Amino acid sequence: MITTIPTAYKDIKFRSRLEARWAVFFDTLGITYRYEFEGFKLNDGEYYLPDFYLPQYAIYCEVKPTWEEVSKNESTFKKFGLTKQWLLLLVDTPNMNTTRLYSYGDYTNVVPFVNLLISKYGNFWGSSYQDGSDKDKFRDYNLFKLACDTAEKYIFY
């Protein structure tokens, strides 16, 4: 079992160092977030509190350290989808291949994180995902790399 380390960043106490690293990533890219913004009562009575809400995308985010942890919680994520909200799964530390987007119902669609950024940056970002490839291509790879590197190397006090 992975032990979490509660971590403070910008006057917010995150439940884990990994969540705090995603906050650093969002800040580096200029993405506004709200931590543990809103909880939901799911259709079976279970309560669920997503880790982040990204208001400019109207999307909730859940941070997990591994895909095994995602699998253990997949039924919760699918029930959350029935609320007709979007949930972006952020697995491991920030990088180009760590996201899966769940829509409402049982339909699951894998979407690289870059596709969400297109609405903010326009043609600043590009993706070959639409062409059947799972490789993202960034017109300015350096900014995305900076955000990943900053999140990975950030020293929390």
Image: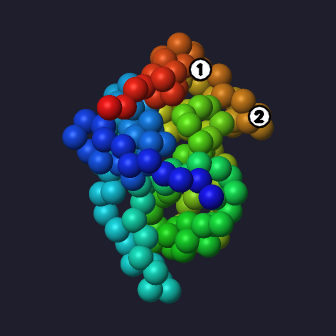
Q: Residue at x 58, y 58 (%)?
A: 102
| Residue drawn at x 56%, y 66% as measured from the top left | 77
Query: Which dot marks residue 138?
Result: 1
- Which residue appears at 69% of the width and 35% of the height? 129
Give the camera-side residue of 91 and 9. Answer: 9
In this orientation, does residue 28 appear? yes
Q: Is label 1 in a helix, a strand or a loop?
A: strand
Direction from residue 70 to residue 5 in the image, left or right: left
Give how far across and how far down residue 105 sits, in percent.
59, 71
Image quarter in which the N terminus is found: bottom right
User: Residue 84: x and y, percent?
Assistant: 46, 67
Identify the coloring.
rainbow
- Between the residue at mark 2 and the residue at mark 1, the CA separation in whole angstroms equals 14 Å
The quadrant in which the C terminus is found is top left
Q: Earlier in the sequence, mark 2 or mark 1?
A: 2
In depth, the one of 48 and 125 nearer the eye is 48
Q: For numbered disc 2, what is the local secondary structure?
A: loop
- Residues 152 and 108: in front is 152
**Which quadrant would residue 138 be assigned to in this image?**
top right
Identity of the residue drawn at 50% across and 70% down: 80
Compared to residue 51, the image places residue 11 above or below, namely above
Q: Is residue 121 visible?
A: no
Residue labelled with disc 2:
133
Q: Is residue 71 above or below residue 57?
A: below
Q: Is residue 80 above or below residue 25?
A: below
Q: Tell me the crowding category of disc 2: few under 14, some 14 to 19, or many 20 or more residues within 10 angstroms, Cα based.
A: few
